Amino acid sequence: MSNDMTISRYLDPKELAAFFRELADAVENGGHDEFACVDDFRKIKIGVKNEYGQISLKAKFKAAKPCAPDVVGEDGEIVKPKYKDLKKRMRGSFKILVKMIHDGSVPPREAVDAFLADAALMVTYPGYGDEYYESFGNVCAEFKTAFDSGDLEKMHAAVDALVHEKSRCHAKYD
């Protein structure tokens, strides 16, 4: 369930333009083959070096969602990601929520939905601040209500409450 994809290879100088055309097509029209999750990228990092007439190409793609299908366990249930991976994923969506709301703009629904889905999953992990989960869940519900209403002032108050809940829990568990 990785969000990362890396391409590393040597090309003839003439092949470099073809690589960029394929990449542009994948971003514009949907990924396929080696560019499977590129159309849903969060970050693309490309390094190109001319090494004695050969082009060294290294491209790293971070997708917004896992590129591989969900892993299904023996009992047919979807296997949860590692807690550390989930927290890292949440950090990205939460950062954009806080920044945009504090800058006075409404964050994209995709970021809100991703954060709230991950928050609902996070509170199912025992031993990582169970005593804070209920109050955190209540603040998430307040944030969702504020977002759905489009009230930026209420979103600001709710996101500040989320920051407070995060700080309380992380002070004890991080």
Image: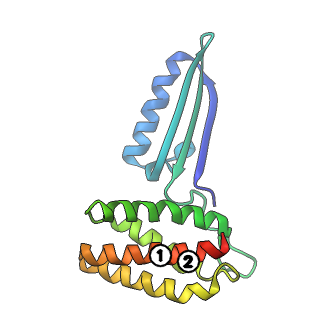
Q: Which quadrant holds residue 57?
A: top right
Give residue 106's mark.
none
Q: Residue at x 37, y 60 (%)?
A: 99
Q: Nearer the viewer, residue 174 or 121?
A: 174
Tell me: residue 150, above or below residue 137: above
Mark 1 residue element:
helix
Tell me: residue 40, above or below residue 117: above
Give residue 168's mark.
2
Residue 31 rendering spot, x and y as whole percentages:
47, 48
> Looking at the picture, which amino acid does disc 2 mark?
Arg
Q: Residue at x 61, y 37 (%)?
A: 7
Residue 138 rendering spot, x and y as whole percentages:
45, 88
Q: Which residue is mark 1?
A: 164
**Residue neighbourhood size for the residue with mark 1, other residues' Cα within 10 Å, grouped as few (<14), some (14–19), many (≥20):** some
Whether label 1 touches label 2, CB < 8 Å: yes
Tell me: residue 76, above or below residue 15: below
18 relative position to 153: left or right: right
The C terminus lies in which quarter of the figure? bottom right
| Residue 107 visible in image | no
The N terminus lies in which quarter of the figure? bottom right
Q: Which quadrant holds residue 131?
A: bottom right
